[in-house]
Image (spheres, rainbow, N blue to C red):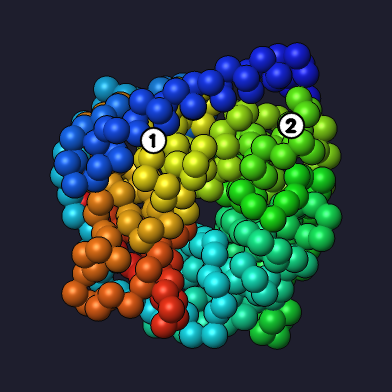
Amino acid sequence: MARTQAYRRIRRAAVALLLGAAVTACAGGPAADRASDTPTSPPTETTTTPPPTDAPSPGSGTEGDSPAREPTEHDLEPAAPTGTATVTEEHPLTGITDPWGLAVLPASGDLLVGSRTTGVIYRVAKDTGDITEVGTAASHAVGEGGLLGLAAADKTYFFAYYTTTSESRVVRSAYQTDKPEGQQMETSGRLTGLPWGDTRVGGALLLTPDGSLYAGVGDLGGTSSTAQSDSPAGDILKAPEVLGASWNPQLPDMEVYSGAQGSVEGLALDANGRVWAVGRGEEDSAVLALADSDQPLHVWTDGAAPTGLAYTPQRCLWVSTADGILWRVPLDGTELVIDPRPAVDVVNGPPRELSGRYSSLRSPTSAGEDALWVLATGDEGAALLKLSVS
């Protein structure tokens, strides 16, 4: 491990104190009373070390040309204080039980959607909503466990985070579209031995353009089996070069990118290469922070656990919560422009086109410059929604 056990023990204790203090400080503030919409301290994303500003973008430039420069903090204007999210498409997910986990296939723009309870992974056509069964993960759903996060690299590989009867795993599968429906995934690598339980199981995945995979591990409620200093419970793990021909990492060799994040429910990469995370904190609060920071950017203290995180080029993060709200989080670098505000609320003020059919939103995923995909669920079924955002 990259850290000594003693260091990790001290770090966990310090972060626990910081998060507890943040929840207490926010409990009576504007984030707890969303009607007031008074700004509080901004939610922050998890950070990776940004690439040098003069480094070439992947695939850009030719030999002899000046390399393309990555955008810097000074190149990006702050996000607009306010914006909108409008439903432009609604694709019913007929036959998909408890949809959970969403990933865009880069080549086609189609989406992978998982069923948490059955482990089946489906492909949903972006334009028509047609559903094709890809295959079934060897998951086991008890409590909040089952098939959780998904991440897609290209037309070759995708990744799934799921619980089994004895552990949690991250599995890489080769996507074989030439095979019969339901038999289009073949395991080609796995990370095993992650903590397992029936509550606060995490499962967020993020695949970055440099071929690194980030995995958000659940804290399992801080049970005695995960309180050991060498347990990755509540950590964000990083695996580099996950798209090579061979990928079978060992847990002791994994980099602990960030520790003590609670149950990590969402990860996102911003325009400056920073990784952000939203975790499930004490009393089911939602804690938004840079992944490698001990200081929360924003804490929602109304008991609505986070269900996902996305970033769009408007310099906005989007946090979904279990009570059916999609929050718009405008950024100025790593600070808030204003306090997060609800962009969509399918329970207390549903968009007219949804007619109050849904009660929860989860797994927001960027769909380009000014759009998001998000899963909506309710007693009458589930749907894949496309939102135009600003």
Mark 1–mark 2 distance (CA, rounded to whole Å): 23 Å
In this view, the residue in front, 303 or 75, is: 303
Q: Earlier in the sequence, mark 1 or mark 2?
A: 2
Q: How many marks?
A: 2
Rendered location of residue 370, percent (x, y): 27, 55
Label placed on residue 227: 2
- Closer to us: 185 or 385: 385
From the viewer's side, name the closer residue of 208 and 17: 17
Give the amino acid at mark 1: Val
Q: Which residue is mark 1?
A: 299
At horizontal 25% and vertical 78% (from top left) the residue drawn is 355
Q: Residues within 10 Å of mark 1 (few under 14, many from 20)?
A: many
Locate residue 46, reporting x and y percent. Answer: 48, 32
List x then y, in percent, for residue 30: 24, 36
Residue at (37% x, 40% y) in the render: 300
Which residue is at the front of the view, 125 or 339?
339
Q: Residue at x 39, y 53 (%)?
A: 320
Secondary element under disc 1, as helix, strand or loop, is: strand
